[in-house]
Image (spheres, rainbow, N blue to C red):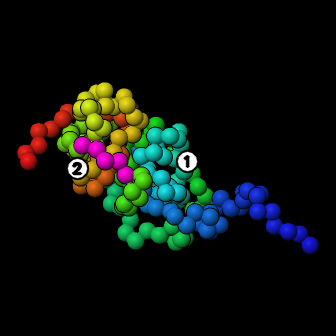
Amino acid sequence: MTFWNWRRSPGPSATQGSAAVALAPELAPIELYTADSRIVAWIAPQGRRVTDLLSTKDELRLWRPSPGQLADAPPAGTDPDASSGDSGEWETLPTARVVLAMPPEWRASRQLRLHRRLRRAALIAGPFNVTGNVHLAPGVEVGQHLLRSSRFMPLTDAYLLHGGDQPFEHVVSVVIVNTAHVSQIVPLVTLA
């Protein structure tokens, strides 16, 4: 008779197929943009903010990533349990390749919320023009020094514009920008 060893880590089969979904029931959708592609996938944030995941890791683990053209519309009714004909394995994407990330819609717990001053700003990140609210710590202003303070910067109530061969625009509640791809950032005057 054998007994289950609760301290033993899951085997390799637990990182594939429906076993991976069972181990990570908190999968959340994410939309990522690199300089030349759009990727829709699922991540397992495990209660962490996506900004923290991107800033602390060199790779982002994606469940069933679906790369496409920049202007492709997001697939409607996507479900991580639905069969898509692929291998169903987790894949990784180097965070250095990510220009923009649209995290899942969720409200962080009180312990994870950062209360900061809001300042409207416009920036150019790779092929994207982004306008949104930057959340600033006390004493910090919008400028190039802000970009050096962290690898990824969230903006809220954001407007995205891509003016390449296939132009498109998006209005999103949150976008996370890779500061390594930002070539210009300008504070905007707010009327209120």
- Residue 34 placement, left or right of 47: left
Q: Give the total number of marks visible in the rendering.
A: 2
Q: Which residue is mark 2?
A: 159
What is the residue that sits farthest to the left in this orientation? 191
Identify the residue at horizontal 31%, vertical 47% (top origin): 115
Q: Nearer the viewer, residue 145 or 20?
A: 145
Instruction: Determine crowd level at label 2: few under 14, some 14-19, many 20+ residues with C-alpha closer than 10 A.
Output: some
Tag 1 near tag 2, CB within 8 Å: no
The reply to whether the magenta stretch includes residue 178 is no
The image shows residue 164, relative to residue 142, as above or below, that is: below
Residue 81, by quadrant, is: bottom right
Q: Which residue is mark 1?
A: 92
Task: Please state which amino acid type lies under the numbered disc 2.
Answer: Tyr
Residue stretch in magenta:
113-117
Task: Please state which amino acid type lies under the numbered disc 1.
Answer: Thr
Secondary structure under the numbered disc 1 in the rendered image: strand
Q: CA distance from mark 1 to mark 2?
A: 27 Å
What is the residue that sits farthest to the top in this orientation? 145
Whether residue 59 is visible to the viewer of this picture, yes or no, is yes
Whether residue 65 is visible to the viewer of this picture, yes or no, is no
Please tell me whether the stretch drawn in magenta is mainly helix, strand or loop.
loop
**Horizontal and vertical percent position of residue 32:** 40, 50
The reply to whether the magenta stretch includes residue 114 is yes
Residue 145: image tag: none
**Horizontal and vertical percent position of residue 72:** 34, 57
- Residue 134 placement, left or right of 149: left
**Horizontal and vertical percent position of residue 48:** 48, 53
The image shows residue 52, relative to residue 24, as above or below, that is: above
Identify the residue at horizontal 41%, vertical 35% (top origin): 151
Specify which label sits upstream in the sequence, 1 or 2: 1
Q: Nearer the viewer, residue 147 or 116?
A: 116
Q: Nearer the viewer, residue 113 or 28?
A: 113
